[in-house]
Image (tube, coloured by chain):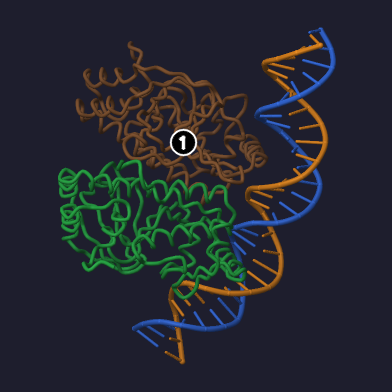
Chain colours: A green, B brown, C orange, D blue
Amino acid sequence: MTSVEHSPLTRKLSAFVALSQVELAVLERLHQRRRTFVARREMVHQGQSAQAAYILSGGWVCSYKRQTDGTRQIVDFQVPGDFLGLRSVLLRTSDHSFEPIVDIEAAEVMTRDLLEAFALTPRLATAILWAASRDEAMVVEHLVGIGRRDADARMAHFLLELGSRLALVGMGGKDGFDCPLTQYHLADTLGLSAVHVNRVLRQLRENGLVTFRDGHVTFDDYGGLVKLAEFDPAYLDQTGPLLK
Amino acid sequence: MTSVEHSPLTRKLSAFVALSQVELAVLERLHQRRRTFVARREMVHQGQSAQAAYILSGGWVCSYKRQTDGTRQIVDFQVPGDFLGLRSVLLRTSDHSFEPIVDIEAAEVMTRDLLEAFALTPRLATAILWAASRDEAMVVEHLVGIGRRDADARMAHFLLELGSRLALVGMGGKDGFDCPLTQYHLADTLGLSAVHVNRVLRQLRENGLVTFRDGHVTFDDYGGLVKLAEFDPAYLDQTGPLLK
DNA sequence: CGGCCATTTGACACCTGTCAATGTCTGTGG
DNA sequence: CCACAGACATTGACAGGTGTCAAATGGCCG
């Protein structure tokens, strides 16, 4: 499609607004300090003086909160093209922990560089704020899901949301996507036990809706899944108002 | 305590940072356009071109999301001193609905006035952003609660959080607070059925922990409640805890 | 080969939802 | 003043969704 190799973040934002050459250049320049993190090693990213955010370019990360009894609740996932710790730069960080799910590659962005980029290209700032507000909308939708959907619908909704997000960066479509998550990750995300996650997955598979297996999610009946989850992606594509 | 009558928002922010006379004046000036809303009449506040936010000075509001099957999930409550729709001004609004729980009084703040106030007094901007990030931390904590706490702990945690928030604006303390919520509100907040909310409240009452009755919450055993809920107010970031 | 991790499955308990009925209080209208 | 309706709170009986416990299976890697 594109002759030039763009970063996932560029792809994502481009789906939201057409960026000029200058804006694209500024965006790419933010990707200079490349860093890698090893799977499962917690990236401490507490409320301290976090002077940098990260743009995830490869691999998956989850942000979670751990309770005193040992259980944890995963609040969100970050996939390529997503920011890590953006809010801790713009506002103040809440005390999440971040854990790479696989080995990841990310670009470290210093606060001053980010703010400078914002000053140079207001439209870029707008686009990035759009991404941040989308993240927040996802947390809210997540809350609704855990509070008011049963396990099947919750799982279906989550997989559909993930599929939509990945499609935006070219890593999946309506047939499915590669997915490095374990059933424990799903359990900690959806507020279920790992055992029940397995039961739910089996049922969805046997009903011909979706198959979660060997690191790959296959949408066997996309329409049926959407119906089961009452999935309305409106909260994801907030195309419009901000840039008008 | 104070000879001058300050707004709840002023009280709240003052607990976070000592504001100068100038900053206090700017803050009070934001309260000029007073409006009232009637209980139970939904304040439509969709993603449209929301050019204003509100500072709640009296009464309670809840923000919620309704599902197609009719159930709803309350995402957050706003009590005096809280902003309504702040994020929809700074970023973009997610599609919540707002419902006054009782008759409320609020100050309408136009975006331009707010931005102007920010420009005049950066410290005020910081304080307000702190409030916004606290709201977000509460949503996350709420997610953790629904996902990983049982009904008793969830209820206890919620009541303690509410108590802390109200204490910040002088509307409650370690003994309790006035509370206009119905058990249906609690159910929609905690992801429970109204019937079960009633059972949980009875149990907490019979265990001598907390009494929810006749529009008033009484902490019968604050310490016991904290222990049951494993309540750690760190996420509220109330630097100068009034509850000490 | 021998651990370790993730997955899978079954049995059972229990937390929570649903259904239904009753009680209480408030406001309204006769 | 009383009858009545409506909203909220309360309680019991019952069903069902999920969690917990335990064990077996299979893949991966040192």
Q: Residue at x 48, y 33 (%)?
A: B77
Check the image and report above or below for A132 versus B45. below
Q: Residue at x 35, y 48 (%)?
A: A95
Q: Residue at x 30, y 35 (%)?
A: B129
Residue toward you, B169 or B230? B169
Residue toward you, A128 or A192? A128
Residue toward you, B150 or B73? B73
> What's the chain of the residue with tag 1?
B
- Secondary structure under tag 1 reads helix
Quadrant into which the C terminus of chain A falls:
top left
Three-letter code, disc 1: Glu
Q: Quadrant of residue D28?
A: bottom left
Side (left or right) of B158 relative to C21: left
Q: Quadrant of residue D8?
A: top right
Q: Residue at x 22, y 21 (%)?
A: B20
Residue labelled with disc 1: B161
- In the rendering, at what x and y percent does residue B53 appear? 37, 29
- In the rendering, at what x and y percent does residue B158 appear? 51, 38
Side (left or right) of A21 relative to B127: left
Quadrant into which the N terminus of chain A falls:
bottom left
- In the rendering, at what x and y percent does residue D16 appear? 70, 56
Side (left or right) of B94 relative to A47: right
Q: Residues within 10 Å of mark 1 (few under 14, many from 20)?
A: some
Would you say residue B176 is visible in this rendering?
no
Would you say residue B210 is visible in this rendering?
yes
- In the rendering, at what x and y percent does residue B74 appear? 52, 39
